[in-house]
Image (cartoon, rainbow, N blue to C red):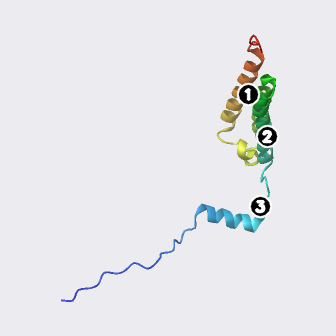
Amino acid sequence: MSQEEPAQPSEELEDPVPTVSEIAEEIAEEEGRRYPSTIGGFFYLWVLAAAALGVAWAWLGDDWRLGVTWISGALLAAAGLRLVLPRRDAGMLAVRHRIVDVLLLGALGGTLLFLARTIPNQPGL
């Protein structure tokens, strides 16, 4: 009886299936990527910048209400844009179903605007 030596695994097995990031890199190289790739991506950056401006104004400015109003305006604009842009053009504004996105963004923006306008001034401020 002869004993067979167990088969040794090869030094390194290459994964024949490419990863998602490898596929994305190949597509980007082939097509020549545009930044942002959709009109919704441009609007998303605008909404993000407006909200960041509002946060900075509320933190550093004398009138916190103006900063919160900027934030609420950015969220309400995002809700309106999400409502009118088709899903393929909405970019990062499209997270869930259209109605859910619009309702959440609109409710949050409306609530912030309501609170910024109705909270009474505090004595000494």
Q: Earlier in the sequence, mark 2 or mark 3?
A: 3
Q: Position of residue 102 (x, y in %)?
A: 71, 33
Q: Secondary structure at mark 3?
A: loop
- Residue that sits furthest to the left in the current view: 1
The reply, left or right, for residue 13 in relation to residue 93 is left
| In this rendering, the label closer to the viewer, 1 or 2 | 2
Find residue 33 and name its label.
Answer: 3
What distance separates the C-alpha of mark 3 from that of mark 1?
33 Å
Q: Quadrant location of the N terminus? A: bottom left
What distance separates the C-alpha of mark 2 from that of mark 3?
22 Å
The reply, left or right, for residue 125 in relation to residue 1 is right
Find residue 109 and name its label.
Answer: 1
Residue ID at (77%, 61%): 33
- Residue that sits furthest to the front in the current view: 124
Q: Amino acid at mark 1?
A: Gly
Q: Amino acid at mark 2?
A: Ala
Q: Quadrant location of the C terminus? A: top right
Q: Position of residue 122 (x, y in %)?
A: 74, 12
Q: Earlier in the sequence, mark 3 or mark 1?
A: 3
